[in-house]
Amino acid sequence: MLHSFALRNMLAVASFALVAPVIAAPVELNLPAQPLSVSLRQLGEAAGLSIAADSSLTGHLQAPAVNGTLEPMVALQRLLAGSGLSYQHAGNTLIITRQQDHGASLELGATSITGAGLGDTTDGSGSYTTGSTSTATKLPLTLRETPQSVSVMSRQRMDDQNLTQLTDAVRQVPGLSINQGGNSGSDSSAIYSRGFRVENYQIDGEQLLNSGYASIFQSNDLAIYDRIEVIRGATGLTNGVGTPGATLNLIRKRPTSEWKSSVGLKAGSWDNNAIELDSGGPLNESGSVRARMVAAYRDAGSNIDRLNERHKVIYGIVEADLTPDTLLSVGADVQHHDANNHARFGLPLFYSDGSHTDWSRSDSAATAWAYSKRHYASGFASLEHQLNEDWKAKATFSRGRYEYDEVIGHASAWSFPDRQTGTGGQTYGGRWAATPVQDSIDLNLRGAFDAFGQRHDLIIGHARQQTRYKADNYRLWYFGSIPTYNGWDGKTPAQPDFEVTGRTDYNEHQESTYGSIRLRATDKLSLILGGRVTDWQNVQKTDNYGPDDEVSRRKETGVFTPFAGVVYDLDDTWSVYTSYTSIFKPQNNLTAPGAFIDPLEGVGYEMGIKAGFFEDRLNFSTAIYQIEQDNFAVATGESAPNGDQFYRAESGTKTRGFEVELSGELLPDWQLSASFSRNIVQDSNGRALNTEVPQNTAKLFTSYLIDNLGNGLTVGGGVNWQNAIYTDGAGPNSVRFTQESYAVVDLMARYPLTEQLSATLNLNNLLDKTYYTGTSSAYYGTPRNATLGLRLTF
């Protein structure tokens, strides 16, 4: 592998004197019109050359078709014709540069080595994997160098499968599952990993502090993101506080060095339509100032009666090279998700006689007056300065404003209507709304140093997040009767007049100092050590408009969350690793007396084998793990008068499992993501917990470019399978409800009609499988559906 510091040194030498040109014999080429990054990779493989290309240079550039027996340099010149790019030689590597930069000192950012490895940016790479990630340790490491289970949902994968919001992508990520109780974006649709609810979300590596409203991001539109990095297991090193399930890190798109624009139109089943715009490039002749703008609008109909969703998103970023060593980035984005006739749960699972209900998959549990408004706006800025060849300082600032207003109205999933008359139904009604604001700052210093004959990596930093809001409190819950489910249109009962019972002033603060170091004991053995010291405070004041006001003050000081990992390279392809992580998470769950459960604490152990084939363009990993926890919150089935669920603290819980994943390029033009995960969660007595979450999941998706068929046809397909799940006490006689194991099959095809215009067809749930997405209510998975998309690049 060519490390980034070695590449920088190589380029510095190349800036003073060019080495003799690479000599290569003519080769037979049949390269179709396709993304430039793909053509460069295929040329490198065919000619046995290493071609280094910054992904921000190649961006969305399209290459012309190149065919025949040609000398590699002639073929390369044809591929770069009209692109504004050139190349120069550095030893046996060809470096892609801007034409005006030819012969100048070069500094590549997100670098991919064609015929070798990938960079961290996935947009324009055509790959289902990435060359590096920093979510687990804050250090930029390859997947094989990272001693934890890492998966990446790349831009190409999102485009191939038409994954438009976060929950779509999560269903395809290895080891993750959604227990969906209601409509998209509902707070009752929890994401699980390794048996635990996922509560750790990041954007560009910046932590979202309050998991209670972080679930808003489940309905985030993915148009603005380059990739999603998923670290399974505890991530106390990068989050400070958090659960051991997983961390989802959404990485925004960055500007490209050449102007490229695209317009996408989509039309799908149930009037699910969308338009997307993506444009960016240099704002001045030298390219020292670059920008990018992404906008999307989706009017999403549904197979569920009356449900309609609208997504609006706009994102902009400007990058400026203030000096050759200083980079300033400033940006903002706005996300709106609005839904009418929105339900948190599905319809009842049982009739009053104990038999299973048989609703249509289109029947809705929502009242006609229920709605959901989830809006988010953020501004962010970062300043990076290269202190010298080895060290970089970075400061990041961000402010995010969340606005949610939920009017809840849906049929009770725990009422049992009469099979014949449809009577006996009940609705729940309520409301909650707030406008939380989070301010974040992160300062860090990252670099490399030499000691004891080896090169080592280090990062140290300080982070601070604060979230605050004031919110009116509404009385929960309002109950109403449904005259009959037969022909119910959701209009009865009428919307109640939601009573404001008080006001809450909420303030949460977290401050952490962190550090991580990779020590290379030998060329093959690396030791990664890290830790985070966190101060956390939460103050919640509730004015109940009476004598019974409430004040809650919780504080944790000097909490240390260590991390340790060892990676040993067996050879240039295979490595083994082991890691240890700690777990600490203050909890908002209440016991029956009304007190908060003590913070969740525990440890996680993981061992595994990883491999990077074809210079890490294909990554393999397998891992076994065990997580031990105390004060794990288990629902008791009892509720407070305001509707809050009561919990008990379970100590001595254990989670064990293993995972296998293969992702990336099997052969030129053949991308694959395949995984299997098994997870078992038990209490201290060995009884199963979280039985509504699948223990076993298998996921597969693959695509292949048939480049000699017309202009080049890409075909793909996949299947997701999970084992049976169940809930005890779901029926009128406390019987068990089980959703048996099932599999869902998807297909896709893409064809370039011209060099600029391509068409993509997606067919989801091809076999029209009928299944429940959870075991708490009768909410069905989406039936067979299709989406046709057109994309114009210019």
Image (tube, rainbow, N blue to C red):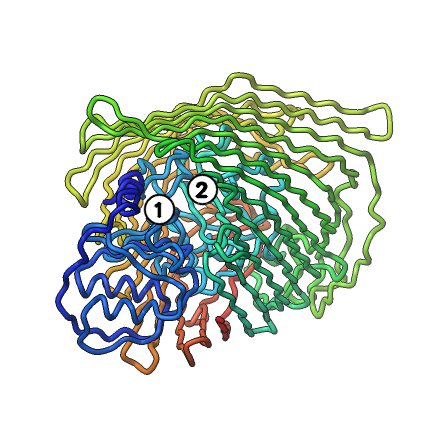
Per the model, the C-alpha gap separating discs 1 and 2 is 10 Å
Q: Residues within 10 Å of mark 2 (few under 14, many from 20)?
A: few
| Residue 248 placement (x, y as % from top left) | 47, 44
The disc labelled 1 sits on which kind of residue?
A: Ser
The disc labelled 2 sits on which kind of residue?
A: Pro
The vertical placement of 111 against 267, above or below, is: above
Q: Which mark is residue 284?
A: none
Q: Quadrant of residue 470?
A: top right
Residue toward you, 679 or 776? 679
Q: Are marks 1 and 2 in contact (CB under 8 Å)?
A: yes
Residue toward you, 476 or 311? 311
Quadrant holding the N terminus: top left
Q: Which residue is mark 1?
A: 105
**In the rendered view, does 740 fall on the left or right side of 728?**
left
Label 2 SS: loop
Residue toward you, 81 or 535? 81
Q: Which residue is mark 2?
A: 324
